[in-house]
Amino acid sequence: MPPLSHVLSLSNAQTVIEAVATVAFALSGLVEAARKRLDAVGVVMVAGLTAFGGGSLRDVLLDRRPFFWVEHASWLWSLLALCIVAMLFLRARHFAITQRAMQWPDALGLGLFAATGTQIALAASMPAIVAVLMGMMTAAFGGVLRDIVCNEIPRAFSDHQPYAICAFIGGWVVVAADAAQVPDTVGLVAGSATAVLLRIAALYTGWKLPKWHAGERGRP
């Protein structure tokens, strides 16, 4: 059994990383809702779904109670405050709301949630492939919900730029660090950084995955 100080440090690291990921995804949801000109309730709902959707799915599948946002109920107040301040700022500053502005906090949230989701699944004694898929779902599902509610085909499936695959690779970095008995906090940081940097590189370079062309041959 690991020493108590080690468990506490890992728990604290997971909490901090999930808190930052929650804020990052909330910002991406908030920007997208503002782009769609939703009202105040819509903005808060989209920000909340984006921030809490992936972690909630993970907790349901792992039968983990309480849900992470119930365990840290103060995050709900923080979300409300963030939405109010952001709406006032956007209205006062006439900030140009673009799709690209949403992509940067989304990339940060993707990497952070991929690492924590994988680590939490490993701690629940899940096999490596299951843990990585849990991390990928934690990272991607909030963005999928955001796009569906905003009446968009989820970008994770349609823009052909690596998204879930970045989370998938970041999750395997966490698994490899765990197998190598690297300190868990180091594995979390390494997995997060890998996924975030891969997503940012894809955005900067315009790298795209192959498109599906079946049935298009012979079309005029």
Image: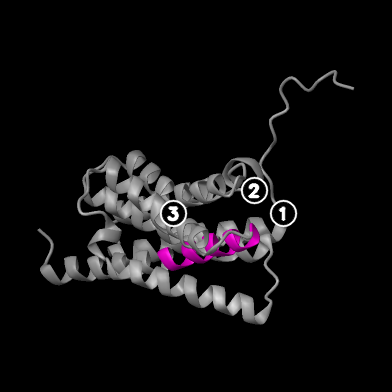
Secondary structure beneath disc 2?
loop
Q: Are marks 1 and 2 in contact (CB under 8 Å)?
A: yes
Find residue 19 and report its horizontal and vertical position in percent.
36, 68
Please tell me whether mark 3 or mark 2 is closer to you in this view. Answer: 3
Q: Earlier in the sequence, mark 1 or mark 3?
A: 3
Q: Residue furthest bottom?
A: 92
Find residue 1 and report its horizontal and vertical position in percent.
9, 58
Q: Amino acid at mark 1?
A: Gly
Secondary structure beneath disc 3?
helix
Drawn side of residue 207 relative to residue 72, left or right: right
- State the residue at coordinates (58%, 44%): 154
Q: Is residue 33 magenta?
A: yes
Q: Earlier in the sequence, mark 3 or mark 2?
A: 3
Q: Is residue 194 above or below residue 122?
A: below
Drawn side of residue 96 relative to residue 81, left or right: right
- Between the C-alphas of marks 1 and 3, the distance is 27 Å
Residue count near mark 2 (Cα–Cα under 10 Å), binned few <14, some 14–19, many ≥20: many
Instruction: Inspect this view and state whether residue 138 appears.
Output: yes
Q: Earlier in the sequence, mark 1 or mark 2?
A: 2
Q: Quadrant of residue 129?
A: top left
**Secondary structure mostly seen in the magenta stretch:** helix
- Between the C-alphas of marks 1 and 2, the distance is 7 Å
Drawn side of residue 118 relative to residue 62, left or right: right
Q: Amino acid at mark 3?
A: Leu
In this figure, which residue is indicated by the disc labeled 3? 49
- State the residue at coordinates (30%, 51%): 179
Please tell me whether mark 1 or mark 3 is closer to you in this view. Answer: 3
In this figure, which residue is indicated by the disc labeled 2? 161
Residue count near mark 3 (Cα–Cα under 10 Å), binned few <14, some 14–19, many ≥20: many
Give the magenta-colored segment's residue range. 22-36
Residue 206: mark in rendering: 1
